[in-house]
Image: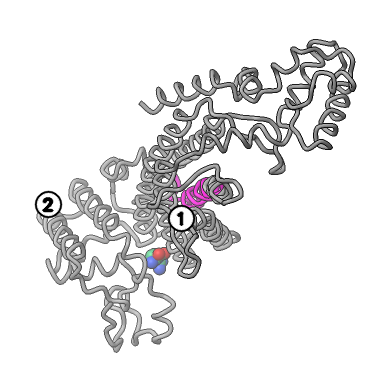
Amino acid sequence: MTDRPQTSANSMWGGRFAAGPDAIMEAINASIGFDRRLYAQDIRGSRAHAAMLASAGIISDSDAAAIGEGLLTVLSEIEAGDFPFRSDLEDIHMNVEARLKEIIGEPAGRLHTGRSRNDQVATDFRLWVRDQCDAAVEALGALIRAALGQAEAGADWVMPGFTHLQTAQPVTWGHHMMAYVEMFGRDLSRFQDARKRMNESPLGAAALAGTGYPIDREMTARELGFERPMANSLDAVSDRDFALEFLSAASICAVHLSRLAEELVIWSSAQFRFVSMSDKWSTGSSIMPQKRNPDAAELIRAKIGRILGATVALFTVMKGLPLAYSKDMQEDKEQVFDAADSLMLALAAMAGMLSDLTANREKLEAAASAGFSTATDLADWLVRELGLPFRDAHHVTGSLVALAEGRGVDLPDLSLADMQGVHAGITEDVFGVLGVHNSVASRQSYGGTAPVQVRAQIARWKEKLA
Ligand code: ARG
């Protein structure tokens, strides 16, 4: 950034100012340090605006052509990295316009007819956030495919299902993976929904009240890919709910990512060994040679901190702001930029990590069989076959678990005589439900963990994504 000494009033709005701002005023006021990221959107919006001004007869065709061409020159300068960003020009809007003036001269001054930086920034930022919604949808698609790949490979692999992180009932690896597919699928649709709602154009709302020039807001809206112009100029320049919605969707998605990341951290530990991460997604320790650390998973787990932080920050900035524009709203961008960057990185890392992950089928199955995971199946058998009320069956099963636990064995290791000692009606058939494969295969209720159900859900998702 070139910081030019501020000796005179701002060339953009300094008509009524005799002197320039204090250096600290410039520092707190300038947003060019971060909003330069909106350059492509800003130039796109300005080109649409200039073309519309000419088509509505507000400026001449030759001025509009000069502006359009000049803006493309500015664009290529910025993209080539040789644009002299100036903090005395505050923001991206004035930096672009000032440079345009240097390039094309007088016609540049006609670009800002019938518009204000208020509708300009609202337009630029909407375009940017809209792109991020598309990027999130794309990244979530890739992540869902990675989870589907895992689910398909292990649709009938058994593993312990947990509640309270205590072994509860056996489930399938495929079922567990498909739970995340559902979560990420809802995340994806949240970004799609948010995009739909934000896809209206603020351009032409001008400072806050609209304009007396015969502008054509439909035309600029169409050119920028918006569904329609926003219907209220005060609303158009003063709301940032589209950014809040993006951040909210990002926060929920980051919560899902964080939960999966946590499971991967636990599962890859020496105590679990349910999965092994590929070398590509692990790090070693500089002192402990045996270590393989799941750093990527840990960082994904942590990203929610920044993303939710940004969400809370922008909600806090927006609450209580009177209509219409206030400079407070300049604080929207850094939060959204940081949250979007964090989310995209976390989504890409999770998709990569999941694709390269190896689930340890034997370990999963051994763990599924431990911890009396089929106790519920035994209770259900007592209900079904012996007609016991569920509460009594629960009690009988509890006694059998206590017996097995006392002997340091699992339920299927008890003899029929042991079982009959607790309830005389139990027969040999009971052993059929004590195996984990039988247990999962029996849970065929819609959405249940039986491999046939899991495969049906995988097929549904594959069709949906095709
Ligand atoms: N840099 C400003 C922002 O991000 C642009 C809008 C300035 N509008 C104004 N009335 N000062 O919010």
Q: Quadrant of residue 403?
A: top right
Q: Tell me the magenta residue range.
A: 231-255
Q: Does the magenta stretch include residue 390?
A: no
Task: Name the residue: 82% across, 15% down.
Answer: 383
Mark 1 → mark 2, Cα distance in angstroms:
54 Å
Please state if 405 lies on the left or on the right of 16 as rendered: right
The residue tagged with tag 1: helix, strand or loop?
A: helix
Marked residue nearer the N-terminal end (1 or 2): 2
Type of amino acid under label 1:
Ala
Label 2 beta carbon less than 8 Å to ligand 1? no
Q: Nearer the viewer, residue 137 or 292?
A: 292
Q: Nearer the viewer, residue 40 or 11?
A: 40
The residue tagged with tag 2: helix, strand or loop?
A: helix
Quadrant of the image where one finds ligand 1 = bottom left
Q: In this view, does 440 lie above or below 357?
A: above
Residue topped by disc 2: 61
Type of amino acid under label 2:
Asp
Q: In this view, does 203 lie above or below 309?
A: above
Residue topped by disc 1: 296
